Image (tube, rainbow, N blue to C red):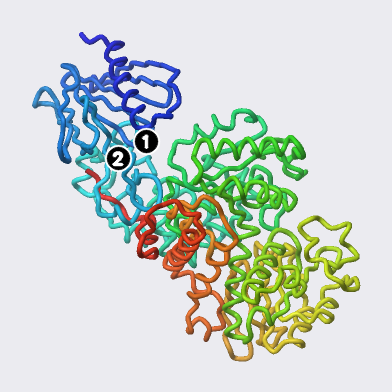
Amino acid sequence: MIDLTSFFLSLFEETQSREQRRKPRNRLLKTLSFSLSVIHPSNTITATLSVSHICFHIMFSTSRCTFLCNSGIGGWSSCSSFSGVQRKQHRGPSRVACSALSTGERHGSILMEISSDETSNGSVVADVDDNAISGGGVQDVYGEDRATEDQFVTPWSVSIASGYTLLRDPHFNKGLAFTEKERDAHYLRGLLPPTVFSQETQVKKMIQQIRLYQVPLQKYMAMMDLQERNERLFYKLLIDHVEELLPVVYTPTVGEACQKYGSIFMNPQGLYISLKEKGRILEVLRNWPEKNIQVIVVTDGERILGLGDLGCQGMGIPVGKLSLYTALGGVRPSSCLPITIDVGTNNEKLLNDELYIGLKHRRATGQEYAELLHEFMTAVKQNYGEKILVQFEDFANHNAFDLLEKYRSTHLVFNDDIQGTASVVLAGLVAALKLVGGSLPDHRFLFLGAGEAGTGIAELIALEVSKQTNAPLDEVRKNIWLVDSKGLIVSSRKESLQHFKKPWAHEHEPVKELADAINQIKPTVLIGTSGQGRTFTQQVIEAMASINEKPIILSLSNPTSQSECTAEEAYTWSEGRAIFASGSPFAPVEYDGKVFVPGQANNAYIFPGFGLGLIMSRTIRVHDDLLLAASEALGSQVTQEDYDRGLIYPPFTNIRKISAHIAAKVAAKAYELGLATRLPQPKDLVKFAESCMYTPAYRNYR
């Protein structure tokens, strides 16, 4: 007869001492709970001991005992018991067996490989070493990086995942791709049809199913359902068919998904932090099952794309962005955390909707809002460390600029609407110069829209021109003009302007209409970031074409319904002379016997590779020069073949290669600026970036 209490306490003391050796600053373990259950018909007794964040899981049967300890690092340690925990010191890779005492039990024994660098004092460590990493960050728990592609992994859950549990675990589920050997080893016989498919066959089957749907939102829901069932197949499908599926999992379809999120909401895909959790945000962060987080995308839902305030339903944006971080940039899905901060909504339709999933009151503002965001930023840094990347997404203008300015010196923060959009547009402009001639300082820019995107792009263009010409930034800005809802931004309006618009208020008489501003300013580049559809009218496009032989026209607002003009309108009204790119995808256009392929100035070109570069170099702050480096890297990937087709961006089919080059350029600049902390610097940063990238190929299971 075993004294369970004494047994558990002795095991806890040993594990706690090991935890203290590994993580000296680990918080005190305070809570203790114990449960015991008998599961028939196998007569297996399962006992669970929870001590704070450490969980012991012990299984007794008539012929064996297994002890598993979740130490909070994503791995488990295992040892045999009943007659005391047998321990040996090891000098090389070894195996610990939880053996059956009789030879008749069909389960046999459970074998796992363990590392041998910490086996003194009789302790046994997990098969995942705290210090063992592949890629640029924390240990590769699930075998996600290319560097670990050929290694075997153990599908751990609460215990070794097997049977029905394994099929319900999206990290490890392979569906019909489980081999005959794996079906025997993990008790899957009878739970699957007898056929074994390759992953390539599964991809072929899934893309056929997706294409059966006619409504984009149905395709979106099918993709999200696949992500929750089989994570690797989802990313394999997305990577192999990126040009077809990118508009499904992100803009423009994600906009509709956010609008209807309350209706289509099935399972939570991220963390929801609301005013109810004020004072407990650190506790909420610790509820997320993954501990090795490297990038967070967070929104408060106030300005979702060009659709306005969608409140808590803005969660579709962080989820979609992080899917692209993984598919396009190779950041591990297990290290990504989508978060929505719910402070209410001013959208009356949502407040009156019984299916709305967020707080049903008007938005908190002022000090209450600032205190919640500050608690969030403090908790993130406390829980995940100095090098956690926080990407702000779709915050309203007045909050977006303030948050970026407040935390850029203390946290690793990045605003994709301000900085990511700017970087991708600058890359397109530099590429367009090869089609229209001249250098960047030779051109004059006019923006419709003076919010986050417009002013962010304008500032990065000014920084690049200043860098090229050594001219003062204030002087360079005089060649860049912005139009907002009240007309051209001029000096006479300066007192009433928001602070982020004031640098762009130049000496000029007031001008109300965009077409009039074009005729007076005579820009060579027209950029739309207004979020207002069809504002590049025929009069506007014709005015640009009358001034320029090859006018550069960028219609960047998302989704498609909010685009300032369509590709067909731009090519038709300019008589086929426009160099055009848009934020949302448009189909090729035939005009006067020639086919024009519109480019897409999609942020997805920049932020996945940019984030990978920060993570793999362990950069601690984002500097403007890193954005310029990303733009330069993207521009260099446009080939002569692309130029011959009128493109100023490379095709998305090469996006993983593009992201690796962007990551390498960003990391190199971070090392140059002294911001990177991963030492020594890898000799070949492109190869290192590729080795860090997540690959969705199925792993072989022990």
Q: Which residue is mark 2?
A: 128
What is the number of callouts on the image? Answer: 2
Within the image, what quadrant is residue 106 found in? top left
* Residue 90 image label: none
Q: Which residue is mark 1?
A: 73
- Quadrant assignment for the C terminus: top left
Q: Earlier in the sequence, mark 1 or mark 2?
A: 1
Identify the amino acid type marked 1.
Ile
Report the Cα–Cα distance between label 1 and label 2.
Answer: 8 Å
**Residue 409 in view of the camera:** yes
Q: Secondary structure at mark 2?
A: loop
The residue at the point 44 percent across, 22 percent down is 28
The residue at the point 71 percent across, 40 percent down is 353
The residue at the point 63 percent across, 55 percent down is 255
Residue 589: give x, y in percent of width and height.
60, 81
Tags 1 and 2 in contact by the CB under 8 Å rule?
A: yes
Q: Is residue 100 left or right of residue 645?
A: left
Residue 110: give x, y in percent of width and height.
19, 33
Residue 574: give x, y in percent of width and height.
71, 85
Identify the amino acid type marked 2.
Val
